[in-house]
Image: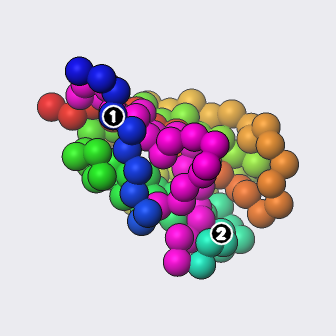
Amino acid sequence: MPNQVISTPAAPQSADYSQAVKAGNTVYVAGTTGVDVATGTFAGTTIEVQARQALLNVQTILRAAGAELDDIVMVHTLLARSDDAGPLCDVFEEFFPDVRPPRCVSRIGVDRPGLLVSLAVVAVID
């Protein structure tokens, strides 16, 4: 089965890469930020607000692929500021109260004013 590009206008898009690719029963979601698609700008200026929006955007992309947040098996988190790790964990607990997917955290390597967090995830659909 060939890889399937996943795209939805309900989440932020880029002309440079796909929002996600579905390979078999695995969905690979590209780095997704806290941009509100209704305004085209970051949802807010705090890590909490941007992380919530980024997770909602990830959820929207996953649903376009036939998956849910519960299907996530790995999250790569990119943070602009290492001090935001604690508040980010609090937001993750809101979205993943029972089974928390494994995560790795790196510093964001691009300079985009206002960008605090980007999430790339892998999900497996049963």
Seen in the image, is 110 located left or right of residue 4? right
Q: Secondary structure at mark 1?
A: strand
Work out which quarter of the rendered image holds the N terminus and state it. top left
Number of numbered discs on residues: 2
Q: CA distance from mark 1 to mark 2?
A: 28 Å
Disc 2 residue type (three-letter): Phe
Q: Which residue is mark 1?
A: 4
Mark 2: few/some/many CA within 10 Å (<14, 14-19, 20+): some
* Magenta residue span: 11-38
Give residue 94's position: percent from left, percent from top. 39, 59
Q: Position of residue 2 (x, y in %)?
A: 30, 23
Local packing at callout 1 (Cα closer than 10 Å; few below 14, some 14-19, many 20+) is: few
Is residue 55 visible in the rendered image? The answer is yes
Location of residue 52 in the rendering, given as x and y in whole percent from the top left corner: 50, 63
In the rendered image, the residue lying farthest to the bottom is 39
Q: Looking at the image, which residue is at 51% across and 64% down?
A: 53
Residue at image x 53%, y 59%? 12
- Measured as percent of width and height from the top left, residue 47 is found at 65, 61
Please determine whether, in this image, residue 39 is positioned above or below residue 72.
below
